[in-house]
Amino acid sequence: MLGILSELIEIKGVSEKIEIATLSGGCFWGMEEILRLIPGVLKTTVGYTGGQTQNPTYLTVKTGKTGHAEAIEIVFNPEKVSFQSLLEIFFKMHDPTTRNRQGNDIGTQYRSAIFFHSEAQKKIAEWVISRVEESQKWKNPVVTEISTAGIFYSAEEYHQQYLQKNPGGYTCHFLRD
């Protein structure tokens, strides 16, 4: 984890203001493929968070016994893309009304969750969820969890930018209207 939000750091030799967002909405491959292309997103890392086991691996997380969710950590420039905008895209790329499931992926590791890094992010998450509910876009209630961000463990290298490496790979994520 990069620590304090909105710090100036060096990425690709350019100082930029940054924040971190951590989101879970099913299999991390499809989420990463959509989010990494958003202008203002500087880096994406897929991994595991929200569980109780130290140093989880794909083999342990997929059992559903570690408590971790497959998640994506997004480093972004809030002057180019806001946390609110990322959440609005998040709610278009997955079904936030299915508890512990996205497409064919079933289990707590595929839950819909926003892991906030600040009170401001928590408030924005609550507000965006209320707007999603009010829109009545979904027939069922939103079940997305809002939790404090904890330790984020990077997934194994073969999971990073998986759909770039495997263009025909499985994904249940797409942008809905």
Image (spheres, rainbow, N blue to C red):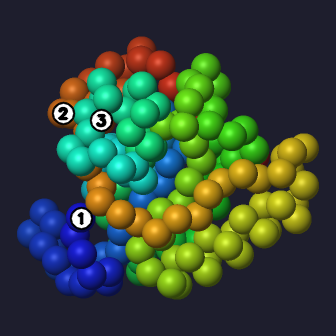
Query: Are there few (<14), some (14-19), or many (20+) residues within 10 Å of tag 2?
Result: few
Q: Is residue 80 left or right of residue 125?
A: left
Task: Please state, as top left, top right, bottom left or bottom right, where the N terminus lies in the image.
Answer: bottom left
Give the residue drawn at x 24%, y 48%: 54
Q: Which mark is residue 62?
A: none
In this orientation, does residue 174 appear?
no
Residue 152 position, x and y percent, is: 30, 55
Give the residue drawn at x 52%, y 77%: 121
Q: Which residue is mark 2?
A: 157
Q: Which residue is mark 1?
A: 1
Question: In terms of sequence position, does the residue under pointer 1 or pointer 3 come before the other?
Answer: 1
Identified by mark 3, the residue type is Gln
Identified by mark 2, the residue type is Glu
The mark lying in front, picked from 3 and 2, is: 2
Distance, label 1 to label 3, CA atoms, is 18 Å
Q: Is residue 20 left or right of residue 99?
A: left
Q: Which residue is mark 3?
A: 161
Distance, label 3 to label 2, CA atoms, is 9 Å
Identified by mark 1, the residue type is Met
